[in-house]
Amino acid sequence: MPASLRFVDVLASGPVAVEDRPAGAAALSEVALASGLALLMTIALGAIVLAHRSGRLPALTRLMAWMDRSRFFGTLAPWAQVPLMVAMVSLITALLGMYWDISLHIGLGRDEGPLANPAHYPILFGLFGISAAGVLACALPRQDEVGPSGVKLAPGWHAPAGGVLLTGAGTYALLGFPLDDVWHRIFGQDVTLWGPTHLMLIGGAGLSLVAMAVLFEEGRVATEQSGRRTSAVATYVLKACLVGGLLIGMSVFQAEFDFGVPQFRLVLQPFLIAVAAAFSLVVARLWIGRGAAVAAVLFYLVVRGGVSVVVGPVLGELWAAVPLYLAEALIVELVALRLASRPLALGVTSGVLIGTVGYAAEHAWTQVAFRLPWTSDVVVEGVLMATVAGAAAGLLGGLLVRGLRRDLPDAVRPRLHFGLALAGIAVCAANGVVATHPDDLRGTVAVSEAGGGEVDLEVTFDREPADGEPAWLTVTGWQGGAGSEGLVVDHLAEGEEGVWRTTRPVPADGTWKTMVRLHDGRDLTAMPVFLPEDAALDEPEIPVGDGTRPFDEEKLLLQRELSDDVPGWLWLAAGSVVLLCSLALVLGLGWGVSRFARATRPEVGAGRGPKVPA
């Protein structure tokens, strides 16, 4: 029996199908075409690499020579500068495509096919560009230009560790594309940002900035070894842009909250903000210097805010709100006044303050900028999670900077700190995704026609819907069509005698999926108002009308496309594969930072960071 039949006993007879787009994986013809495109790009990249290393491609050599003569770009060895520029442009391209893609999914639902969604192209080219930048970083330098952290790829060919890491991060992100198609074939086309394979796309791109930081340092050390003077201003600006990009990459995980259709508990938002802020801004202040945390945030606001403007007003899609991070940047700068010489202590202290004072600042900002502002329901758990995760992320930031300074202590302590920090973040994340739903809540709906396919609603619950103020109690309508009008989030207003009313007419026809959503504590539950017939899913229409309906697991409505007949062991196996791939990426980055930190030569001793206590 279709899952949606649980909600109503009687459905309207003879509904008209309004949704017949494919509900599973892409057609094999589109898979073949996309695979062919990726193969052609890979062949072209391989041809460029081989031509350069054999001396038959002077264009790259001339470009690097010009950059080497530039006072600004000459701050880094050109074999590091060129890949870093390619990677940054690629990251911004992928970022634009990702927010565009999320907006389209919120407005239109699932894709008719991967090649029918225009947002997929900038994502694909952007992620390929990240991987290509890593390949270029491995191919451009001659063996005598790579420092002691280089990795031997073949006889006579040593690649910088940052290039190897960047290639790995980009490849990991690209793997999300074919694996996403496999995931859809097995589990259905889940319309959510936080599907496991979607997290691969995001995580690989976001964490590629760590690899880029290692590559930056390798290029800087090579420049200093050559005896060339570097520009302090150029170094500051380039590093600030790099760490601003890191903040952007770490913030992408919040995108569903930015748009106002999160499919997990609200406590995850302050947790994610604290992790992004503590990790990125601690790195900025310690790695770059005074004022760098604020500079990184300014870069973030320009780029991330610019993407919202392009996707929203320019392309006519949904607007995504932007966390500010300004208070968090000031916190890190102030803490650094006392603890700049103790990176790990600065990281932990900043993280704790970000999880508390920073939480308060972002709480105030959500009240005016976000569709779903934070409420008292999430304060205690939200502050606790943000504080623990902020301290852990700040510790990771301090470790990263000590690695970039080549100043890691003995082998045991960094690994212990690294493991504890990852465990703290993982525990908080696991707690945030655990949700329940009540099995005894029902709502009685009274409908008033408002014209134009919209209705006004009065909802009466058979008991108090929440213990105090809920995290949210809304009527949410989404997937009603392309453009900025494809999403409605209306907060129900409590009236007399326990009657809750909409504050504006809400859609209830066409392709709209409209429901009452309730989030209280760990409970995530929903009641359908209107769901269209979906021929591809063999789901009937749930019509709008007066009557009493039960609340059920929210996921059944928000992710209607998910298959409900997949055995549990298959979910576990598939999720474990993605988890292991993700763990390999994180551990690989840790290995790369450690390798760079411990690769020392007498002639670069002056370029090493100062020995400081933890």
Image (cartoon, helix red, strand yellow):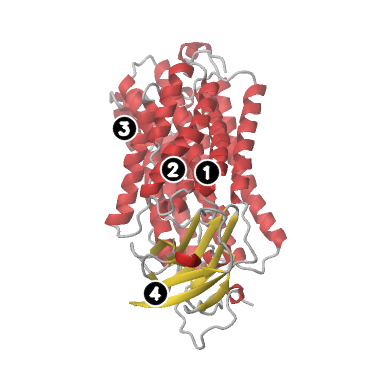
Q: Quadrant of the C terminus?
A: top right
Q: Is residue 21 left or right of residue 504?
A: right
Mark 4 sits on what residue?
Answer: 455
Give the mark toward the camera: 4 or 3.
4
Residue 132 shows up from this direction:
no
Instruction: Give the residue type that dot 2 points to.
Output: His
The answer to whether any part of residue 237 appears in the image is yes
Mark 4–mark 2 CB contact (< 8 Å):
no
Frontmost residue, 325 versus 287: 325
Q: Amino acid at mark 4?
A: Val
Tell me which numbered mark, 3 or 1, is placed earlier along the sequence. 3
Farthest residue in the front direction?
Answer: 497
Q: Residue 199 versus residue 594: which sits nearer the camera?
A: 199
User: Disc 3 residue type?
Assistant: Arg
Residue tagged 3 = 62
Q: Residue at horizontal 52%, vertical 35%?
A: 164
In the rendered image, which quarter contains the N terminus?
bottom right
Is residue 456 shown above or below 208? below
Residue behind mark 2: 363
Where residue 254 appears, as percent x and y from the top left, is 47, 48
Task: Using the image, determine if residue 49 lies above or below residue 573.
Answer: above
Mark 3, secondary structure of its residue: helix
Residue beneath the point at 59% across and 48% down: 432
Structural crowding at the residue carrying mark 1, measured as other residues with C-alpha within 10 Å and reported as few (<14), some (14–19) or many (≥20): some
Q: Marks 4 and 3, how far apart in space? A: 65 Å
Q: Residue at x 33, y 54 (%)?
A: 311
Name the residue type under label 1. Val
